[in-house]
Image (cartoon, rainbow, N blue to C red):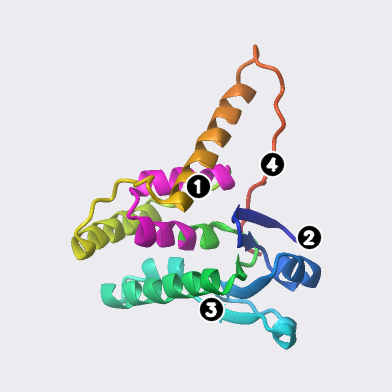
Amino acid sequence: VAEACKVKDALFLGNVMAVQDATFVVMNKIGYCIKCQTGFTVPQTLRRVGVTYAVMNLLGAFLDPTLPIETKDQLLEKFHSLIESASDQGVGVLLYSFDDLTWCCFSVVAFWLRKYRWTVAHAIRVMTSRRPALQFTSEAVSELQSLATRLAKKYGGTTEMDLSNEEEKILTNTCNNAQRLGSRETDPTSSPPFHDDTGGGSSPA
């Protein structure tokens, strides 16, 4: 069954079935399908209508102790450039994995650290507002912390959020609204609110 999750306008996460759903890809004007997990293949049938397919396994790279830090950061730079290029072109991006969307979520969090210089805690909090069942391993979180430290040193900025950027503001406010909604749902005295259940990912087969 196809499963997809909207992170923000023009950025989606999906499983192996979602990337093969031509209607979903075309309706959302997706121009790039980026595979965030290796070990499986999908037919690249939408190349004929201008969709670009790429493989960028950030989680696998960052957890590989044999890869130099420079190689990991270069991969993130390529990922960052591709996402920004898609935005400039006005097309959407679908990040996909086989079934466990944690692979895609890691890429988004790393991208936010690179673009906004957020703290890791804030980036994960925003990501979790889109994928409530998201759980990173301690090793993955440690890699994100190290990345945030490197980015702060490289760009001379802090890793605190800056809400002067409109997109940052929208992402953060949406997260805050989702968390307030969740608090109301656990409060027996509150009226039942509308809820957009994004669901959770399961482990790859």
Label 3 SS = strand
Is residue 187 depicted above or below 142 in this figure?
above
Residue underneath mark 1: 171
- In space, the residues marked 3 and 4 are separated at their CA atoms by 28 Å
Kind of residue at badge 3: Val
Task: Pick the quarter of the image with the N terminus.
Answer: bottom right
Q: Earlier in the sequence, mark 2 or mark 4?
A: 2
Choose top left, top right, bottom left or bottom right for residue 61: bottom left
Q: Earlier in the sequence, mark 2 or mark 3?
A: 2
Residue underneath mark 4: 197
Label 1 SS = helix
- In space, the residues marked 2 and 4 are separated at their CA atoms by 16 Å
Q: Residue farthest to the top?
A: 189
Residue underneath mark 3: 55
177 to the left or right of 124: right
- In space, the residues marked 2 and 3 are separated at their CA atoms by 22 Å
Residue underneath mark 2: 1
| Magenta segment boundaries in residue numbering | 107-132
2 and 3 marks in contact (CB < 8 Å): no
4 and 1 marks in contact (CB < 8 Å): no
Q: Nearer the viewer, mark 3 or mark 1?
A: 1
Q: Residue farthest to the bottom?
A: 48
2 and 4 marks in contact (CB < 8 Å): no
- In space, the residues marked 4 and 1 are separated at their CA atoms by 17 Å
Q: Residues within 10 Å of mark 4 (few under 14, many from 20)?
A: few
